């Protein structure tokens, strides 16, 4: 069962079951709304890596209109950043953040969209090729060691901290991703809960690509860590079947949905702050894109806010002084 079969089986499931993804639609929170102050997304930058010598990571940064350099901001980091930042894609995260921050449903938040590491002569990740065939994505994202955590905590965070006032409190920091990007996000928080304590996981690859199927038992056998996590998956995700009909063989360690269910069971048994939803979709970003606003609201549901009947400071729409009406978004 090589990587080629694995990729091919996922694509086959997606093609056959596409109608079960098409039922999911983006809502108004994922669209640009009139009058909502719009944050800015930087140009793509490159981060050389010491954890993976000879590679670099492309990344860009979203800064909300409400950001005040005098006040520490929350932080959210998205793996496979090219998929999450596109305002014509399944997630349209800049629009979601604009709308939720405007309504004070999440804190003022810097967001970073980072792609898997690549060599300088390899192409940048794109909507058509996330990097499995052209970058270090398979190793970085699916391995359970702490090397990719070092990219985020030891290489990226120091650069960000020089440019932005980011809260040092790990409760104010979240990390997320889809598929292999989801297990990568969990692994960063698993190794470094002193830095990240919120995880957003969509169609997570907690499977035996690089040993990720062991996480449920690892969670059970390890002292509970202060991590909050929201998992999404579809019952038609890749189910570990190879072949057709009665001759098809089944590999439980390659069953995406079964492994996500095992993750929830282990996290629940251990007393983690965990939420989840199972849809009808395949290995697709359609459902998770549709519910991204709610996933973010849940992860950040208790960020500190004064609640005083006489205090209106957090009971109005958040429009920074001098903000102009939102203009059409530029594609990063």
Image (tube, rainbow, N blue to C red):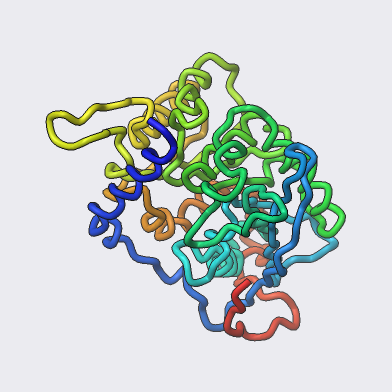
Q: Relative to residue 265, is residue 59 depicted above or below?
A: below
Q: Relative to residue 304, is residue 147 depicted above or below?
A: above
**Image x and y of residue 39, in percent:** 66, 71
With 216 as the anchor, is 67 left or right in this view? right
Q: Image quarter for residue 9?
A: top left
Residue furthest out toward the top = 221
Relative depth, front residue between 95 and 105: 95
Q: Relative to residue 188, is residue 57 depicted above or below?
A: below
**Image x and y of residue 277, in percent:** 36, 44
Q: Relative to residue 249, is residue 50 depicted above or below?
A: below
Image point 48% across, 51% down: which residue? 295
| Location of the C terminus (image quadrant) | bottom right
With 277 as the anchor, is 82 left or right in this view? right
Residue furthest out toward the front = 121
Q: Image quarter for residue 258?
A: top left
Image point 55% across, 63% down: which residue? 93
| Location of the N terminus (image quadrant) | top left
**Image x and y of residue 274, in percent:** 47, 35
Relative depth, front residue between 310 and 98: 98
With 96 as the anchor, is 54 left or right in this view? right
Image point 45% across, 28% down: which residue? 208
């Amino acid at each position: 069962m090589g990587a080629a079969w694995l990729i091919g089986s996922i694509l086959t499931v997606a093609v056959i079951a596409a109608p079960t993804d098409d039922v999911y639609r983006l809502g108004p929170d994922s669209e640009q709304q009139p009058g909502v102050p719009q944050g800015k997304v930087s140009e793509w930058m490159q981060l050389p890596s010491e954890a993976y010598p000879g590679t670099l990571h492309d990344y860009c940064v979203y800064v909300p209109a409400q950001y005040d350099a005098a006040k520490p901001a929350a932080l959210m980091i998205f793996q496979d950043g090219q998929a999450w930042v596109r305002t014509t894609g399944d997630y349209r995260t800049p629009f979601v953040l604009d709308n939720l921050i405007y309504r004070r449903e999440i804190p003022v938040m810097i967001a970073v969209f980072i792609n898997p590491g690549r060599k300088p002569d390899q192409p940048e990740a794109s909507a058509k090729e996330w990097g499995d065939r052209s970058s270090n994505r398979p190793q970085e994202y699916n391995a359970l060691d702490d090397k990719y955590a070092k990219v985020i905590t030891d290489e990226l965070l120091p650069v960000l901290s020089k440019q932005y006032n980011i809260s040092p409190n790990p409760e104010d920091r979240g990390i997320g991703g889809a598929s292999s990007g989801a297990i990568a996000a969990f692994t960063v928080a698993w190794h470094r809960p002193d830095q990240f304590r919120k995880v957003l996981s969509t169609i997570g690859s907690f499977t035996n690509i690089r040993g990720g199927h062991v996480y449920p038992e690892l969670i059970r056998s390890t002292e509970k860590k202060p991590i909050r996590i929201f998992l999404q998956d579809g019952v038609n995700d890749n189910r570990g079947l190879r072949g057709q009909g009665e001759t098809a063989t089944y590999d439980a360690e390659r069953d995406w949905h079964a492994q996500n269910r095992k993750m929830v069971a282990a996290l629940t048994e251990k007393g983690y702050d965990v939420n989840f939803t199972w849809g009808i979709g395949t290995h697709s970003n359609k459902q998770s894109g549709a519910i991204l606003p709610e996933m973010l609201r849940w992860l950040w549901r208790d960020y500190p806010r004064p609640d005083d009947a006489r205090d209106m400071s957090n009971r109005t729409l958040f429009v920074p002084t001098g903000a102009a009406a939102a203009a059409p978004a530029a594609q990063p």
